[in-house]
Image (cartoon, rainbow, N blue to C red):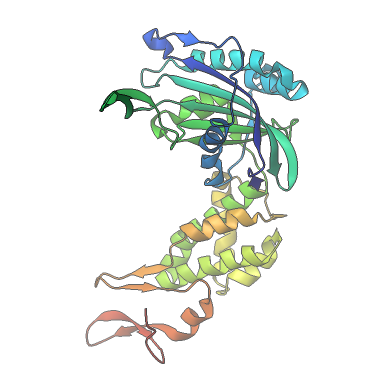
Amino acid sequence: MINLFSTHIESLSIHRVGNKSRNEAIFLSAEPYKTNDELTPLLKEFFLKPFRDKEENYFKFSHEADLEFHELFNSTTKIFDNPENIHDESRKIATYLYNQSEHPHIKSGEVYIAYLEGVQLDNIKMDAIGIFKSELKQDFLQFSEEGNQLDAMLQHGVSLNKLDKGCLIFNSNKVEGYKILSVDSNRYDARYWLESFLGVEALADDNFHTKKYLKFCQDFAKDVVLPAEDKKQEVMFMNRAVNHFAKNDTFEETAFMNDVIDNPDLLPEFRHYKSEKAPKYSIEDLTTFPIANTAVTAARKKIKNVINLDTNIQIKLDFINPESAEKFVEKGWDEEKQMYYYLVYFNKEEKS
Protein backbone atom coordinates (compact mmCIF):
# COMPACT_ATOMS: atom_id res chain seq x y z
CA MET A 1 0.00 0.00 0.00
CA ILE A 2 1.41 3.41 -0.93
CA ASN A 3 1.17 6.70 0.95
CA LEU A 4 2.24 9.76 -1.07
CA PHE A 5 1.18 12.45 1.41
CA SER A 6 4.72 13.31 2.56
CA THR A 7 6.34 12.84 -0.84
CA HIS A 8 8.26 15.78 -2.23
CA ILE A 9 9.98 16.45 -5.55
CA GLU A 10 13.72 16.61 -4.95
CA SER A 11 14.68 17.02 -8.62
CA LEU A 12 12.76 17.51 -11.88
CA SER A 13 13.86 17.39 -15.51
CA ILE A 14 11.53 18.25 -18.39
CA HIS A 15 12.05 17.28 -22.04
CA ARG A 16 9.85 17.08 -25.13
CA VAL A 17 9.59 14.06 -27.43
CA GLY A 18 7.92 14.07 -30.81
CA ASN A 19 6.70 11.21 -32.97
CA LYS A 20 9.77 9.73 -34.62
CA SER A 21 7.82 8.22 -37.53
CA ARG A 22 6.55 11.69 -38.45
CA ASN A 23 10.07 13.15 -38.22
CA GLU A 24 9.10 15.27 -35.22
CA ALA A 25 12.01 16.49 -33.12
CA ILE A 26 13.17 15.69 -29.63
CA PHE A 27 14.12 18.54 -27.28
CA LEU A 28 16.39 17.75 -24.34
CA SER A 29 16.79 20.36 -21.63
CA ALA A 30 20.38 21.19 -20.75
CA GLU A 31 19.69 21.59 -17.02
CA PRO A 32 17.15 20.35 -14.46
CA TYR A 33 14.01 22.43 -14.11
CA LYS A 34 14.12 24.95 -11.28
CA THR A 35 10.87 24.54 -9.37
CA ASN A 36 9.31 27.20 -7.17
CA ASP A 37 6.93 27.28 -4.20
CA GLU A 38 3.96 28.21 -6.40
CA LEU A 39 4.35 25.54 -9.09
CA THR A 40 5.81 22.62 -7.11
CA PRO A 41 2.61 21.65 -5.19
CA LEU A 42 0.60 21.86 -8.42
CA LEU A 43 3.06 19.59 -10.23
CA LYS A 44 3.09 17.17 -7.31
CA GLU A 45 -0.70 16.87 -7.46
CA PHE A 46 -0.59 16.55 -11.25
CA PHE A 47 1.97 13.73 -11.09
CA LEU A 48 0.76 11.76 -8.08
CA LYS A 49 -3.03 12.07 -7.98
CA PRO A 50 -3.63 9.25 -10.53
CA PHE A 51 -1.68 6.83 -8.33
CA ARG A 52 -3.70 7.64 -5.22
CA ASP A 53 -6.93 6.82 -7.06
CA LYS A 54 -5.63 3.69 -8.79
CA GLU A 55 -5.79 0.03 -7.83
CA GLU A 56 -2.28 -1.09 -6.90
CA ASN A 57 -1.29 -3.52 -9.65
CA TYR A 58 2.49 -3.68 -9.50
CA PHE A 59 4.91 -4.41 -12.33
CA LYS A 60 8.62 -5.13 -12.59
CA PHE A 61 11.21 -4.62 -15.30
CA SER A 62 11.61 -7.71 -17.44
CA HIS A 63 13.98 -8.79 -20.22
CA GLU A 64 13.98 -12.03 -22.20
CA ALA A 65 17.73 -12.48 -21.68
CA ASP A 66 18.80 -10.64 -18.53
CA LEU A 67 17.96 -7.41 -16.71
CA GLU A 68 21.49 -6.12 -17.38
CA PHE A 69 20.34 -5.57 -20.99
CA HIS A 70 17.27 -3.55 -19.94
CA GLU A 71 17.93 0.12 -20.64
CA LEU A 72 15.45 1.58 -18.14
CA PHE A 73 16.54 -0.87 -15.43
CA ASN A 74 20.14 0.29 -15.86
CA SER A 75 19.18 3.99 -15.78
CA THR A 76 17.05 3.39 -12.69
CA THR A 77 19.91 1.67 -10.87
CA LYS A 78 22.35 4.47 -11.73
CA ILE A 79 19.91 7.06 -10.39
CA PHE A 80 19.20 5.23 -7.13
CA ASP A 81 22.94 4.58 -6.65
CA ASN A 82 23.68 8.28 -7.14
CA PRO A 83 20.65 10.63 -7.36
CA GLU A 84 22.89 13.38 -8.74
CA ASN A 85 22.94 11.38 -11.99
CA ILE A 86 19.24 11.88 -12.58
CA HIS A 87 19.38 14.72 -15.11
CA ASP A 88 21.94 12.98 -17.33
CA GLU A 89 19.95 9.75 -17.09
CA SER A 90 16.70 11.64 -17.75
CA ARG A 91 18.10 12.70 -21.14
CA LYS A 92 18.82 9.04 -21.92
CA ILE A 93 15.32 8.03 -20.76
CA ALA A 94 13.66 10.71 -22.93
CA THR A 95 15.77 9.63 -25.92
CA TYR A 96 14.80 6.00 -25.34
CA LEU A 97 11.12 6.99 -25.19
CA TYR A 98 11.54 8.95 -28.44
CA ASN A 99 13.03 5.90 -30.14
CA GLN A 100 9.93 3.88 -29.18
CA SER A 101 7.59 6.56 -30.57
CA GLU A 102 7.36 5.17 -34.07
CA HIS A 103 3.68 4.31 -34.38
CA PRO A 104 1.72 7.05 -36.20
CA HIS A 105 -0.91 7.15 -33.41
CA ILE A 106 1.60 8.08 -30.71
CA LYS A 107 1.31 11.71 -29.70
CA SER A 108 4.17 14.09 -29.02
CA GLY A 109 4.40 15.58 -25.54
CA GLU A 110 6.41 16.70 -22.58
CA VAL A 111 8.26 14.13 -20.48
CA TYR A 112 8.93 14.80 -16.80
CA ILE A 113 11.50 12.75 -14.87
CA ALA A 114 11.38 13.40 -11.13
CA TYR A 115 13.33 12.15 -8.15
CA LEU A 116 10.85 11.68 -5.32
CA GLU A 117 11.66 11.44 -1.62
CA GLY A 118 9.44 10.50 1.30
CA VAL A 119 7.36 7.84 -0.50
CA GLN A 120 5.84 5.25 1.83
CA LEU A 121 5.40 1.75 0.41
CA ASP A 122 3.95 -0.85 2.79
CA ASN A 123 4.78 1.52 5.69
CA ILE A 124 8.46 1.75 4.67
CA LYS A 125 9.80 5.16 3.66
CA MET A 126 11.88 5.15 0.47
CA ASP A 127 12.77 7.10 -2.65
CA ALA A 128 11.15 6.68 -6.05
CA ILE A 129 11.62 7.83 -9.63
CA GLY A 130 8.65 9.25 -11.48
CA ILE A 131 8.40 9.28 -15.27
CA PHE A 132 5.38 11.20 -16.54
CA LYS A 133 4.15 12.30 -19.96
CA SER A 134 1.59 14.93 -20.97
CA GLU A 135 0.20 14.57 -24.49
CA LEU A 136 -3.23 16.15 -24.89
CA LYS A 137 -3.33 19.94 -25.08
CA GLN A 138 -6.31 22.18 -24.35
CA ASP A 139 -7.31 25.69 -25.33
CA PHE A 140 -7.69 28.22 -22.52
CA LEU A 141 -8.18 31.95 -22.21
CA GLN A 142 -5.63 34.31 -20.68
CA PHE A 143 -6.84 37.81 -19.76
CA SER A 144 -4.91 41.07 -19.51
CA GLU A 145 -5.85 44.65 -18.68
CA GLU A 146 -5.05 47.20 -21.37
CA GLY A 147 -6.00 50.63 -20.07
CA ASN A 148 -9.74 50.52 -19.45
CA GLN A 149 -10.22 47.39 -21.58
CA LEU A 150 -10.01 43.70 -20.62
CA ASP A 151 -8.44 41.68 -23.43
CA ALA A 152 -8.71 37.92 -23.92
CA MET A 153 -5.96 35.85 -25.53
CA LEU A 154 -6.40 32.25 -26.69
CA GLN A 155 -3.55 30.01 -25.56
CA HIS A 156 -2.81 26.32 -25.93
CA GLY A 157 -1.30 24.20 -23.16
CA VAL A 158 -1.37 21.29 -20.74
CA SER A 159 -4.22 20.87 -18.28
CA LEU A 160 -3.08 19.93 -14.78
CA ASN A 161 -6.34 18.05 -14.18
CA LYS A 162 -5.34 14.84 -15.95
CA LEU A 163 -2.01 13.07 -16.48
CA ASP A 164 -1.82 11.11 -19.73
CA LYS A 165 0.87 8.58 -18.82
CA GLY A 166 3.08 7.94 -15.85
CA CYS A 167 4.95 5.44 -13.72
CA LEU A 168 6.48 5.32 -10.25
CA ILE A 169 9.60 3.19 -9.86
CA PHE A 170 10.20 2.40 -6.18
CA ASN A 171 13.62 1.73 -4.74
CA SER A 172 12.46 -1.73 -3.73
CA ASN A 173 12.86 -5.29 -5.07
CA LYS A 174 15.88 -4.39 -7.21
CA VAL A 175 16.90 -8.02 -7.80
CA GLU A 176 13.46 -8.84 -9.23
CA GLY A 177 13.37 -5.70 -11.41
CA TYR A 178 12.12 -3.07 -8.93
CA LYS A 179 8.51 -2.45 -7.94
CA ILE A 180 6.60 -0.26 -10.40
CA LEU A 181 3.16 1.33 -10.68
CA SER A 182 1.88 2.61 -14.03
CA VAL A 183 -1.05 4.71 -15.25
CA ASP A 184 -2.17 5.30 -18.83
CA SER A 185 -5.25 7.35 -19.69
CA ASN A 186 -5.00 6.64 -23.43
CA ARG A 187 -5.68 2.95 -23.94
CA TYR A 188 -5.21 3.01 -27.72
CA ASP A 189 -1.40 2.92 -27.36
CA ALA A 190 -1.02 0.91 -24.13
CA ARG A 191 1.56 -1.45 -25.66
CA TYR A 192 3.78 1.52 -26.49
CA TRP A 193 3.97 2.66 -22.87
CA LEU A 194 4.00 -0.63 -20.93
CA GLU A 195 5.76 -2.95 -23.35
CA SER A 196 7.83 -0.92 -25.80
CA PHE A 197 9.00 1.78 -23.38
CA LEU A 198 8.80 0.47 -19.81
CA GLY A 199 9.38 -3.18 -20.71
CA VAL A 200 7.54 -4.56 -17.67
CA GLU A 201 5.53 -7.58 -16.63
CA ALA A 202 3.16 -8.15 -13.74
CA LEU A 203 4.86 -8.56 -10.36
CA ALA A 204 3.59 -11.77 -8.77
CA ASP A 205 3.22 -10.40 -5.25
CA ASP A 206 0.49 -10.85 -2.61
CA ASN A 207 -1.75 -8.35 -4.39
CA PHE A 208 -1.32 -10.19 -7.70
CA HIS A 209 -2.08 -13.61 -6.17
CA THR A 210 -5.13 -12.33 -4.28
CA LYS A 211 -6.54 -10.60 -7.34
CA LYS A 212 -5.95 -13.56 -9.65
CA TYR A 213 -7.44 -16.13 -7.26
CA LEU A 214 -10.57 -14.04 -6.72
CA LYS A 215 -10.95 -13.64 -10.48
CA PHE A 216 -10.63 -17.42 -10.82
CA CYS A 217 -13.38 -17.84 -8.19
CA GLN A 218 -15.60 -15.37 -10.02
CA ASP A 219 -15.30 -17.33 -13.26
CA PHE A 220 -15.88 -20.63 -11.43
CA ALA A 221 -19.07 -19.17 -9.97
CA LYS A 222 -20.26 -18.11 -13.42
CA ASP A 223 -19.19 -21.25 -15.33
CA VAL A 224 -19.97 -23.96 -12.75
CA VAL A 225 -22.08 -22.75 -9.81
CA LEU A 226 -24.64 -20.87 -11.91
CA PRO A 227 -25.41 -23.78 -14.34
CA ALA A 228 -25.43 -26.32 -11.49
CA GLU A 229 -27.61 -24.26 -9.14
CA ASP A 230 -28.93 -20.75 -9.82
CA LYS A 231 -28.06 -17.05 -9.86
CA LYS A 232 -28.66 -16.66 -6.15
CA GLN A 233 -26.12 -19.37 -5.34
CA GLU A 234 -23.62 -17.85 -7.78
CA VAL A 235 -23.88 -14.53 -5.96
CA MET A 236 -23.72 -16.17 -2.54
CA PHE A 237 -20.68 -18.24 -3.48
CA MET A 238 -18.76 -15.11 -4.42
CA ASN A 239 -19.98 -13.42 -1.26
CA ARG A 240 -18.60 -16.25 0.86
CA ALA A 241 -15.36 -16.24 -1.15
CA VAL A 242 -14.74 -12.52 -0.68
CA ASN A 243 -15.68 -12.70 3.02
CA HIS A 244 -13.24 -15.58 3.52
CA PHE A 245 -10.45 -13.48 2.03
CA ALA A 246 -11.50 -10.46 4.08
CA LYS A 247 -11.41 -12.22 7.45
CA ASN A 248 -8.11 -14.08 6.93
CA ASP A 249 -4.53 -12.85 6.69
CA THR A 250 -3.29 -15.96 4.88
CA PHE A 251 -5.03 -17.98 2.18
CA GLU A 252 -5.02 -21.75 2.58
CA GLU A 253 -6.88 -23.58 -0.16
CA THR A 254 -8.29 -26.50 1.84
CA ALA A 255 -9.68 -24.17 4.51
CA PHE A 256 -11.09 -21.94 1.76
CA MET A 257 -12.91 -24.82 0.05
CA ASN A 258 -14.38 -26.07 3.34
CA ASP A 259 -15.56 -22.58 4.26
CA VAL A 260 -16.90 -21.40 0.90
CA ILE A 261 -18.20 -24.44 -1.01
CA ASP A 262 -21.30 -25.54 0.88
CA ASN A 263 -22.42 -28.04 -1.77
CA PRO A 264 -20.19 -31.17 -1.49
CA ASP A 265 -20.92 -32.05 -5.13
CA LEU A 266 -19.04 -28.91 -6.21
CA LEU A 267 -15.77 -29.84 -4.45
CA PRO A 268 -14.52 -32.16 -7.24
CA GLU A 269 -15.82 -29.64 -9.78
CA PHE A 270 -13.70 -26.94 -8.14
CA ARG A 271 -10.55 -29.08 -8.26
CA HIS A 272 -11.20 -30.04 -11.89
CA TYR A 273 -11.88 -26.44 -12.91
CA LYS A 274 -8.64 -25.30 -11.29
CA SER A 275 -6.58 -28.03 -12.95
CA GLU A 276 -7.93 -26.91 -16.34
CA LYS A 277 -7.99 -23.13 -15.92
CA ALA A 278 -5.12 -22.43 -13.50
CA PRO A 279 -2.56 -21.36 -16.17
CA LYS A 280 -4.93 -18.63 -17.34
CA TYR A 281 -4.81 -17.05 -13.86
CA SER A 282 -1.18 -17.93 -13.01
CA ILE A 283 -2.29 -19.99 -9.99
CA GLU A 284 -1.10 -23.47 -11.05
CA ASP A 285 0.82 -24.27 -7.86
CA LEU A 286 -0.83 -21.69 -5.67
CA THR A 287 -2.39 -23.21 -2.53
CA THR A 288 -1.25 -20.77 0.16
CA PHE A 289 -0.22 -17.10 0.15
CA PRO A 290 -0.56 -13.89 2.23
CA ILE A 291 -3.79 -12.05 1.44
CA ALA A 292 -3.63 -8.41 0.24
CA ASN A 293 -6.51 -6.42 1.74
CA THR A 294 -6.40 -3.79 -1.01
CA ALA A 295 -7.08 -6.45 -3.65
CA VAL A 296 -9.99 -7.84 -1.61
CA THR A 297 -11.54 -4.38 -1.28
CA ALA A 298 -11.15 -3.75 -5.01
CA ALA A 299 -12.69 -7.13 -5.88
CA ARG A 300 -15.68 -6.55 -3.60
CA LYS A 301 -16.48 -3.32 -5.46
CA LYS A 302 -16.48 -5.11 -8.83
CA ILE A 303 -18.54 -8.17 -7.92
CA LYS A 304 -22.21 -7.86 -8.77
CA ASN A 305 -24.70 -8.87 -6.09
CA VAL A 306 -27.84 -8.34 -8.19
CA ILE A 307 -30.16 -10.98 -9.65
CA ASN A 308 -31.66 -9.64 -12.90
CA LEU A 309 -34.95 -11.27 -13.88
CA ASP A 310 -36.54 -11.33 -17.35
CA THR A 311 -39.63 -9.68 -15.86
CA ASN A 312 -37.68 -6.41 -15.44
CA ILE A 313 -37.26 -6.95 -11.71
CA GLN A 314 -33.98 -6.85 -9.82
CA ILE A 315 -33.19 -8.47 -6.47
CA LYS A 316 -30.17 -7.05 -4.70
CA LEU A 317 -28.54 -9.30 -2.13
CA ASP A 318 -26.72 -7.85 0.86
CA PHE A 319 -23.00 -8.69 0.98
CA ILE A 320 -22.67 -7.23 4.48
CA ASN A 321 -25.29 -9.57 5.96
CA PRO A 322 -25.30 -12.63 3.66
CA GLU A 323 -27.26 -14.74 6.11
CA SER A 324 -30.32 -12.62 5.24
CA ALA A 325 -30.30 -13.90 1.66
CA GLU A 326 -29.88 -17.48 2.86
CA LYS A 327 -32.71 -17.26 5.41
CA PHE A 328 -35.24 -14.93 3.81
CA VAL A 329 -35.00 -15.52 0.04
CA GLU A 330 -36.36 -18.76 -1.41
CA LYS A 331 -36.61 -19.90 -5.02
CA GLY A 332 -39.48 -22.05 -6.29
CA TRP A 333 -41.52 -23.15 -9.32
CA ASP A 334 -45.17 -22.22 -9.93
CA GLU A 335 -46.94 -25.03 -11.83
CA GLU A 336 -49.94 -22.90 -12.76
CA LYS A 337 -47.94 -20.04 -14.26
CA GLN A 338 -45.10 -22.29 -15.41
CA MET A 339 -42.62 -19.78 -14.04
CA TYR A 340 -39.90 -19.62 -11.41
CA TYR A 341 -40.37 -17.27 -8.47
CA TYR A 342 -38.41 -15.83 -5.57
CA LEU A 343 -40.19 -15.67 -2.21
CA VAL A 344 -38.88 -12.88 0.05
CA TYR A 345 -39.75 -12.78 3.75
CA PHE A 346 -39.76 -9.52 5.76
CA ASN A 347 -41.37 -7.89 8.78
CA LYS A 348 -41.70 -4.34 7.49
CA GLU A 349 -40.58 -2.15 4.63
CA GLU A 350 -37.62 0.08 5.43
CA LYS A 351 -37.86 3.77 4.67
CA SER A 352 -35.40 4.86 1.97
Which of the pair 320/40 is nearer the observer? Answer: 40
The correct choice, above or below, for 183 with respect to 281 in the image is: above
- Give whichever of 293, 208 is nearer the camera: 293
Task: Give how far across and how far down residue 208 sits, in percent.
Answer: 62, 46
Residue farthest to the bottom? Answer: 347
Q: Give the image quarter of residue 171.
A: top right
Furthest residue toward front: 148
Q: Position of residue 332 (x, y in %)?
A: 36, 83
| Residue 66 showing in the rendered view | no
Query: In the picture, residue 83 is in which quadrant?
Result: top right
| Front one among 79 and 249 | 79
Residue 285 visible in this rendered orientation of the protein: yes
Which residue is painted at 58% across and 27% down in the image? 36
Which residue is drawn at the image coordinates 74% and 31% (left, top)? 174
Q: Is residue 315 above or below residue 193?
A: below
Q: How many marks?
A: 0
Q: Identify the residue shown where x is 67% and y is 61%.
A: 253
The one nearer the camera, 34 or 73, is 34
The picture places residue 20, in percent across and down from the top left corner, at 43, 11
User: Is 20 on the left-hand or right-hand side of 65?
Assistant: left
* Image quadrant where one finds the C terminus: bottom left
Q: Is residue 31 left or right of residue 305?
A: right
Query: Which x, y percent locates residue 295?
Result: 59, 53
